[in-house]
């Protein structure tokens, strides 16, 4: 949306201002307000403009989400009606065949698992980076590192994805074999062969989201009041105890928000994942096996050659991604809100 | 368990800036010692050197000796973490941990010391909150957030948190400057009560407060901005406020300067 700066407060009233009860445009009296003027609520044109701008933005956002949802539902319906499989449970994807048979189960599974594993890898590392920069590093190093992390966060994640793909993924075989050797007794890490697996996709995703989660977490930890850090230190806390007592609890809601942003990126990430995964449509609990697909990667792979039903099917899977993202965010909000009065925002 | 403190030749720096120079004083056990003086004279700095909180700030360092019952706080083998467990501190602005309940705030220090037994913790919470004259006001809502209390209650909660670990010395850095007169009175009563168990050092801008609560008073001052602060006079509070030796002390306590 365009936000033209109001050139002058007495300019012609823009849209929206007319809806509110516009007060007479008397400029504030120069010689100090009289009692009568002071008792009247003073609502300037600039206030009205700003109020309506923010209101428009707020409702606009809600409307946008609603429109996206409606669009997805409308475009998906005819494909879903033509589907001969169960859309939620079928582990196949033949929407272009006749009769079409497809289900989102495998791609949804791949999306959720790869994003979750990426989070498990990336969030602790990101929090560690943020803690090092804000608590441990000497002042000069800390400002340099902070600057670098912010810079890295601004680089589009696909760049990291490509690096992960081209440089890292070929070297993943050893790590996967090692995991299989030593942790193979856990079904998650057992595999007949290793290769372009969900695990590799997860590592690439983790690299992609690491900078943004680290940068946001650093910002969060910087907000911890020095008074709380000193309170912990004065009680005889070591640096790590101070982090546990004052920094982490205070920063938790922010770190959760940062992680959600990272999770959103991980679930929506397309190209890098599409290039890693072999695009198979079966659910496998074995993370290291060369198998798997994600919703976003499937859309990228399938859109070009899809017919009408095929596109509808892909849009339907997009709708599922939309809903899952929303559910994840609602859960995160709930976690943050659970102890809101302990959040420190009231202090 | 109260302890005497001997400061000799103490000089404190913030980076290259010399904040306080050559301070010598002896703080008696189970006494209240007040640090007074104009802003920037280094009284808070000196206070923070007594539990090695000064060096928490980047670039800050200390020269000289601080002996706690004869043991040098700045000795080679002394761990600042242990010093701070012996010398508790209350800050200018109440700073209870906002993420913790009243109960959790009081036991925060105990948990750092590895105390886990529920019965013992319960006992110490009540003891400390009673010690801080806060128990009656909060005993029915120990699970509520500490940040939800009034400013004066928060400050007493911070005092409870500090005394829960049973330190030997309690440092207070202008503990009433953010409080209303009623809460200030409550804290002053508390200080009088606490000195039977702790050696207390309090920094205050309020000279009436110094004369009301303290046994000994140290007056700090500085020649001009940029100069290091110096200890001008240190004596019994009654002497400082009625018949000080130094002209500058007299000017300050009588309100002619500062």
Image (tube, coloured by chain):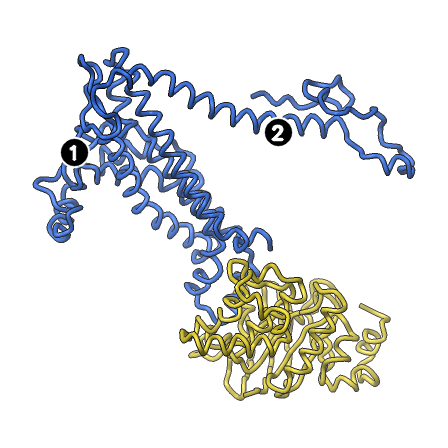
Which quadrant would residue A77 be assigned to in this image? top left
Neighbor class of circle 2 (other Cα within 10 Å; few <14, some 14-19, many 20+) is: few
Foreground residue among A162 and B1: B1
In the rendered image, the quadrant that contains the N terminus of chain B is bottom right
In the rendered view, tell whether residue A239 sits above or below residue A300.
below
Q: Residue at x 42, y 23 (%)?
A: A69
- Tag 1's secondary structure? loop
Q: Can residue A144 be seen in this view?
A: no
Foreground residue among B176 and B21: B176
In the rendered view, tell whether residue B1 sits above or below residue A11.
below
Mark 1 / mark 2, whichever is N-terminal: 2
Report which residue position mark 2 lands on: A54
Foreground residue among A118 and A39: A39
Neighbor class of circle 1 (other Cα within 10 Å; few <14, some 14-19, many 20+) is: many
Distance from Cα at disc 1 to Cα at disc 2 = 47 Å
Q: Which residue lies furthest to the left in this view?
A: A192
Q: Where residue B128 sits: x, y (%)?
A: 56, 77
Q: Where residue A74 sits: x, y (%)?
A: 38, 17
Label at residue A281: none
Q: For chain B, what colour was chosen?
A: yellow
Q: For chain A, what colour was chosen?
A: blue
Label at residue A291: 1
- Tag 2's secondary structure? helix
């Amino acid at each position: 949306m365009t936000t033209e700066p109001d050139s002058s407060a007495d300019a012609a009233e823009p849209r929206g201002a007319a809806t509110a009860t516009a007060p007479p445009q008397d400029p504030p009296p120069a010689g100090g307000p009289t009692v009568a003027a002071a008792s009247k609520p003073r609502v300037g044109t600039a206030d009205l403009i700003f109020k309506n701008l923010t209101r428009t933005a707020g409702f606009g956002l809600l409307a946008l989400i609603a429109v996206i949802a409606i669009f997805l539902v409308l475009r998906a319906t005819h494909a879903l009606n033509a589907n001969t499989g169960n859309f939620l449970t079928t582990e196949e994807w033949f929407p272009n065949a006749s009769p079409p048979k497809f289900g989102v189960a495998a791609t949804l599974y791949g999306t959720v698992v790869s994003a979750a594993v990426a989070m498990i890898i990336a969030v602790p590392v990101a929090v560690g980076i943020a803690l090092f920069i804000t608590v441990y590093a000497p002042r000069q190093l800390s400002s340099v590192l902070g600057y670098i992390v912010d810079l890295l966060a601004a680089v589009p994640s696909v760049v990291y994805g490509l690096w992960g793909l081209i440089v890292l993924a070929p070297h993943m075989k050893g790590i996967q074999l090692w995991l299989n050797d030593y942790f193979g007794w856990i079904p998650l890490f057992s595999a007949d062969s290793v290769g372009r697996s969900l695990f590799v996709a997860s590592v690439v995703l983790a690299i992609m989201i690491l900078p943004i989660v680290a940068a946001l977490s650093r910002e969060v930890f910087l907000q911890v009041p020095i008074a709380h850090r000193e309170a912990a230190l004065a009680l005889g806390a070591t640096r790590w105890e101070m982090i546990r007592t004052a920094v982490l609890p205070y920063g938790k809601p922010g770190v959760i928000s940062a992680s959600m942003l990272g999770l959103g990126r991980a679930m929506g990430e397309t190209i890098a994942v599409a290039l890693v995964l072999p695009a198979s449509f079966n659910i496998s609990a074995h993370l290291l096996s060369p198998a798997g697909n994600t919703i976003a990667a499937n859309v990228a792979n399938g859109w070009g050659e899809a017919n009408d039903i095929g596109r509808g099917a892909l849009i339907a899977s997009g709708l599922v991604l939309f809903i899952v993202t929303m559910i994840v965010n609602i859960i995160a909000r709930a976690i943050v809100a659970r102890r809101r009065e302990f959040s420190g925002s009231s202090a | 368990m109260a302890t005497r403190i001997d400061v000799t030749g103490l000089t404190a720096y913030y980076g290259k800036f010399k904040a306080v120079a050559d301070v010598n004083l002896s703080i008696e056990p189970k006494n209240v010692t007040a640090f007074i003086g104009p802003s920037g004279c280094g009284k808070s700095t000196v206070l923070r050197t007594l539990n090695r909180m000064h060096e928490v700030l980047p670039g800050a360092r200390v020269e000289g000796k601080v002996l706690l019952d004869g043991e040098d706080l700045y000795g080679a083998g002394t761990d600042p973490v242990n010093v701070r467990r012996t010398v508790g501190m209350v800050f200018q602005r109440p700073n209870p941990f906002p993420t913790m309940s009243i109960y959790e705030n009081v036991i925060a220090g105990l948990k750092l010391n590895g105390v886990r037994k529920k019965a013992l913790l319960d006992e110490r919470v009540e003891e400390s909150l009673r010690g801080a004259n806060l128990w009656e006001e909060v005993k029915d809502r120990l699970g509520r957030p500490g940040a939800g209390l009034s400013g004066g209650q928060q400050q007493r909660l911070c005092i409870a948190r500090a005394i829960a670990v049973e330190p030997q010395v309690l440092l207070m850095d202008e503990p009433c400057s953010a409080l209303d007169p009623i809460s200030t009175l409550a804290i002053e009563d508390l200080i009088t009560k606490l000195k039977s168990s702790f050696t207390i050092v309090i920094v205050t801008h309020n000279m009436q407060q110094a004369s009301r609560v303290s046994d000994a008073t140290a007056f700090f001052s500085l020649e001009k901005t940029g100069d290091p602060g110096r200890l001008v006079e240190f004596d019994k509070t009654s002497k400082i406020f009625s018949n000080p030796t130094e002209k500058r002390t007299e000017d300050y306590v009588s309100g002619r300067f500062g």
